[in-house]
Amino acid sequence: MLTFGVMLYNAEQQFNQKLERKQQSLGSYADLLADPLWNFNSKRVESILETMMLDTDVIRISISDEGGNQVIEKASSDQTLGQVISRKYSYPINYSNAHIKQKVGELSIVLGYQSLQNDKAQFILSGVFSILLVVAVLSAGTWLMFSRLMDAPIKALINAIKRSKERNEFIRVAPSSHDELGVISIAFNEMQANLENNHNKILEAKERLQLLYHSTPSLLFSFNQEGVIQDTSDYFLGKV
């Protein structure tokens, strides 16, 4: 939100600066009009106004004499300019030479803000796009970083489980971090250690049972589920 607010502030500042430069640029025409207006050079005056009308934001220009009487007026032929936000600016037309300095009229300009508003909107859209692009890049980078950090420990756990299943071994994994995945890795290693310990105890118990089974001086034999003799004691075989 702070970034968006700064962007809006910069857009408004840029708008005001462009508007001020445009006002200064149009105001300079008042000095150009002074001499032809003083000398009643209507063609020169009209030529200057035609040049000013090339600015797409200029809606209407009028020149009045020192008595406030309108001398000439030019208006844009674009009908849509009447619907845009506009403001009237006035500039005095002062004529001066080596002998006199006198106000000979006033230049009035109705200026629309359409192109300036479009520039402002474009600036904001570009800023929003830039912000979204930065957010997208940061999000993608964060996701990629975390996916890689998480992918390696998870793959190690999966490989350890697979190898333990295929080789009948109790593979451990090296904890790669101190976060939740590291805790899971430690818990997995503890589980593997317990399974290996219980497995060894079962093997030891089986060996003791086999030793007892074969060393007992009795005729011992065992059947499987189908009723077939599966095993007999050594003592039994010795007596057969």
Image (cartoon, rainbow, N blue to C red):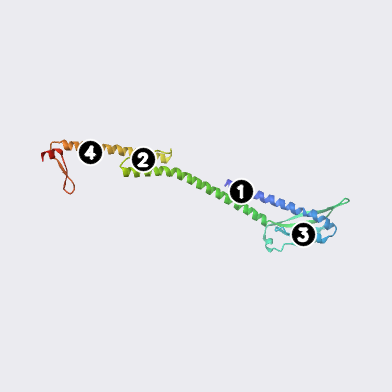
**Which residue lies under the disc numbered 1?**
7
Percent from the top left, x then y, of residue 135? 54, 48
Pointers 4 and 3 in contact (CB under 8 A)?
no
Q: Earlier in the sequence, mark 2 or mark 4?
A: 2
- Residue positioned most to the right: 99
Check disc 2 and report its element: helix, strand or loop: helix
**Which residue lies under the disc numbered 2?**
188
Q: Earlier in the sequence, mark 4 or mark 1?
A: 1
Residue at (20, 38) in percent of width and height: 210
162 relative position to 37: left or right? left
Check disc 1 and report its element: helix, strand or loop: helix
Residue at (15, 38) in percent of width and height: 234
- Taking depth in this image into account, of 63 and 124 the one nearest to the observer is 124
**Which residue lies under the disc numbered 3?**
49
Asked whether residue 62 appears in the rendered view, the answer is no
**Which residue lies under the disc numbered 4?**
206
Check disc 4 and report its element: helix, strand or loop: helix
Which of label 4 and label 3 is nearer to you?
4
Q: Amino acid at mark 1?
A: Met
Pointers 2 and 3 in contact (CB under 8 A)?
no
Q: What distance separates the C-alpha of mark 1 from that of mark 2?
A: 51 Å
Q: Earlier in the sequence, mark 2 or mark 3?
A: 3
Which of label 1 and label 2 is nearer to you?
2
Within 10 angstroms of label 3, few (less than 14), some, or many (20 or more) residues?
Answer: many
Q: Which quadrant: the C terminus? A: top left
22 relative position to 135: left or right? right
